[in-house]
Image (cartoon, coloured by chain):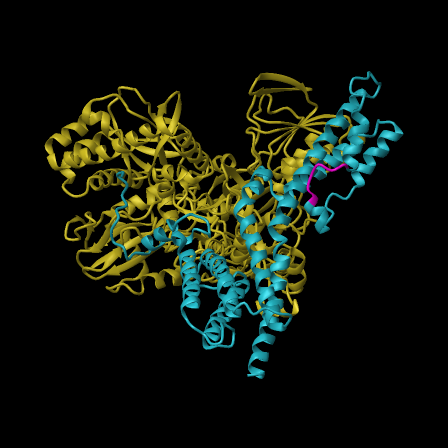
Chain colours: A yellow, B cyan
Amino acid sequence: MGRGPAGWGGSDLAEKLRVAIVGSGPAGLSAAAHAASLGLSHVLIEKTDHLSDTIFKYQKGKHVMATPGNLVLRSDLDFDAGKREAILDTWDRQIGEGKVNALYNAEVVKITGTKGNFTIETKKGDVIHAENVVLAIGTQGNPNRLRCPGNELPHIQYQLDDPAEYNDEHIVIIGTGDAGIENARGLADDPKQRNVVSILNRGSEFPTAKDANVKALLADHEAGKLTIRTETETRLVEPGWITLTTRDGEIRIQCDRIIARIGSAPPRKFVEECGIAFTSPDRNAFPKLSPMFESSTPGIFVIGALAGYPLIKHCMNQGYDVIEFISGNTALKPADEPILVEKFKGLPGKRSTEEWLEFLRADVRILNGMNPLQMREFMLGSDTRAFKRGEVIFERNAPGSSLFGIAQGSVAVEVDPNDPSVTVPIEQGSIFGEVGLISGRRRGATVRAAEDTIVVEISRLGALKLQSQVPSAKDAIDRISIERQLLQLFGSGLTSQDVGELVAAAEVIGVPAGQTVIEEGAEDKDIYIIRRGSMIVEKNLGGHPVFLSYLPAGSYFGEMAVIDGSRRTATVRAAIKSEVVRFPGAAFTAMLGRKQDVRQRALDDMAARREINDFIESRKASFGGAVDMYSQTAQFLLDNGLGEATDVLLIDEKLCVGCDNCEKACADSHDGLSRLDREAGRTYAHLHVPTSCRHCEHPHCMADCPPNAIRRGPDGEVFIDDSCIGCGNCQRNCPYGVIRMDAKPPKKPGLLPWLLFGSGPGPGEASYAWRKQAAEGTEAPKVAIKCDMCSGIEGGPACVRACPTGAAIRVSPERFLSVARLEEVE
Amino acid sequence: MMASLVSRDDEDTGFFAAERRRSAEHGSFLAHRRFYWAKVSGGLALFALLTYLLVDVEPRHNGGSWYGYTLGTIGLGLIVWLAWLGIRKRRPTPGSWSLKGWTSAHVWLGLSLVVIGTLHTGFQLGWNVHTLAWALMMLVIVTGVYGVTVYATLPARLSQNRREMTREQMVESLGMIDRQLEAAAQPLSREDTDHVIAALEQDVFSTGVLDRLRGPDRDDATRRALARISTGRAYDHDEDDIAQQKVRALLGRRAGQIDQIRRQMRTKAMLEIWLYFHVPLTIALLAALTAHVVSVFYYW
């Protein structure tokens, strides 16, 4: 296959090349193509026998997207959205025409030397000398290894090519992703092979595998073809045997072969051995790079996914750019320059892009620790905006999770909702909006520009990235958010000085779901604020816990024991994974002693809470059943994600006649595809939580979206925009299974033609067969589809409007989990 | 009630619009807006009844008097509007309508037609196209009353029987049992196997109306196979006893699964069957009404 110069293969290449490019993904390919077109001596080193292995391994016919749309492509190779095959063909052809020197079947194992004189060794024994190295090896192709003793034994393998090769063996598969499941089923499929196959699962669920695969695996298990061992981990590997840790202790079973399919990670070890430093010890951290993509080892450049850019277009542009830099064109402006120019266009003051970036970096304190390359990339995900004096920047209760930094001017926060004239100033260089960022909840106060002001608005993702890259920024954001939350808690009347002591003594604590923060009857005297997540308050009545109330982020608790010195009157535990801030009770009491009006407010709040407790306790005596029901229903809803929801669809199955009009209306309001599955999901006491988006406070789906297509809209809805590339990450990340991957079907005939002449599939989502047939020749790519709460549609969610019996309702947790429900139950 | 950062002011923001929508009363279509449409409908019927008694029409009440025309026009308008529900529910257009509100109005105003329509006839019934329209209207209402009754009583049963399974899951579960049954029955004797095969071949999803309404607990191939393999042999120490036990357990599960599916199909059928009368009768009613109105004006 090797199309490289003759004579390679286990030999030493005497000629020193200008650049060696490791990895032939989009980044490496583009770099090689540009090196060839500039006439630079080069070699493209590829581990496999074909180009671009990651895209090569995409399933047949997959539609590959070309986002971001506003970024121009700067490469000698062509790339446009299209089918996998077409893209690979184009690249193969252009690489051939461009006289690129490619070396196939060459896995680089070692890079040594310094700038101007690197030596690259491959597994086969090729040695290549080059002045510069471009690492474009991506983050795939580096399987995670087993970590238990015995992990170096030869009968452990990390891939399986042909399951039919193995007979009469005891085989253990580790990992229950799609790869592991497919391997296990393949090995156990034919009884004639007489393999004894076990598959190990660390947990008891299969969150990373496709539903169909899981079902098939469970069926095989039931049919006795193979064994699934859940809650099991490997403890020790020996020739012929494996020792496992299970819930019931250790067991040792026969094992002739181990196939580990436990994911892959960036090849950090290899990269570090090349002398390249990373930004942090974090598993997902990226290498430290200069604006020219040069790593901490001069002469080694890192581009593409390994540099933190997962999108094909970015990668290809970087391939081009890095070759320009190496060939001496250091003045080259990145391809994203026009995007940045556009971002700064509307601002007052004439500055160049560099000057703007430096202005923001120097004047907004949390950005001080960034380098120019980071700043550039950071600005691509952020925005700058100018506000006139008095203009509203955001309003109370508006959804929003972005963070604002004040580059110039200052803002005023209206802390008292009843009196806009009571404001707290925030000065130049500081930040605001951090509560929305941390808690994922709506804005707590209206913020106006106090003078002509320039702010930088940092998207949630940008802010998260910033905090992980620049530790000082994280500390600053944490400290400011704690102080502001304290100040807002009791409305006006407190200043930074008043709470200084408390803030200094505060401690942020992560609380896993279900863990108790305060135990009823205990004598500790601290007070807490919920920073993110939510808590539930329970009281032990007659021997079992009774649900008292639900506390969303931003609430405080634990004040009763502090104020009146009593024991804890109720238990508070985390409804979901949360973070609380703990303040020592003594400091809080001291603060209350100094501020009598705040003390009064706290006492009022406390009295109100007492009233609820007393109310439920009194009901417990007379209507025990209703209280239990209320309590259990609340727990059921929390178990089904209501604790992190902002707006969730519930179905009262005492009213639901199963007409599926909700699904039909959903499909007909959104391109003909339904975003909810009414029947699926859990039910308790006739209250059904269908498979439909909960619009989480911290959406899991947003965690890993390459084009950053998932955002929160103006009504608080979490939606996916047109830049979706159909990668399916969000679908895998959603714990509630509410995201589907499907192609937008063609338009169907209207309602009247259907009613009168029966043309088209009728109301609701058309059958798969109809969609497939109607789309013949014009198939749209599969993209992620989820509920957008009918944003922009007058009247609101179609599922609720279209329910004929009133069974479908949408609720927010703090409303639905309130004591008012108890009266309803009764 | 608690120190959340949300307070109950600034009413005009989108947030409060959403909150209002979400806290929209959660209740049945019958009780929609505290029985608003029941009250409107009752008031309408009462008003018609009172005027009927108070207004003196010579020689006697009939559809052709000014009073009769008034009632007839109201009735016609109502019928056409009530029939429009069929379009409304299939068209999720934007706007702040609620199908629950429409259903509520449909049910209650539909009931008021019993009074309005009947008073419109002036109790002059006979074998003609006019009485046909009245009779069809009454039939539509009767089927509708059945519909309201099942809507109010059956959904809880549907939910209970489902036990969190979707339709696909029930069918899949049956398929899984069948696959296991097929494998487990291999060691059985010829006659026993024949019974298992007969059970596997039986059509569970017979779609006939009567079949659907008959529901579970039938003497079918699965139960016959179960009877054959269990009866008298449960404690035999056969060679293939273990295989038999397995098949028996699987047949039991199969029978249970079929029952669940059939129960679901029956409840769904009861919730839907009336529509197969209600809707065609409505269309017939609209046709009869047209004939009625045309003939009245033709022979004016």
Residue at the spot x=66%, y=35% of the render?
A217
Is A596 rendered above or below residue A58? above
Give the mark count: 0
Viewer-nearest residue: A365 or A772: A772
Question: Does the magenta run of residues contain B217?
Answer: yes
User: Residues in magenta?
Assistant: B214-219
Residue at the spot x=14%, y=41% of the render?
A493
Viewer-nearest residue: A601 or A334: A601
Residue B150 image offset from top left, x and y in percent? 56, 48
Residue B272 image offset from top left, x and y in percent? 61, 52
Quadrant where the C terminus of chain B lies?
Answer: bottom right
Residue at the spot x=24%, y=40% of the render?
A485
Residue A302 image offset from top left, x and y in percent? 47, 46
**Image-based side of A725 in relation to B10, left or right:** right
Q: Farthest front residue?
A: B59
Viewer-nearest residue: A341 or A276: A341
Is A20 rendered above or below residue B254? below
Is A489 rendered above or below residue A518? below
SS majority, magenta: loop
Question: Does the magenta run of residues contain A239?
Answer: no
Quadrant where the N terminus of chain B lies?
Answer: top left
Q: Quadrant of residue B39?
A: bottom left
Q: Quadrant of residue A205?
A: top right
Residue B24 image offset from top left, x and y in percent? 38, 51
Is A87 rendered above or below residue A587? below
Q: Quadrant of residue A582?
A: top left
Tell me if residue A104 can be seen.
yes
Tell me if residue A190 can be seen.
no
**Image-based side of A389 in relation to A298, left or right:** left
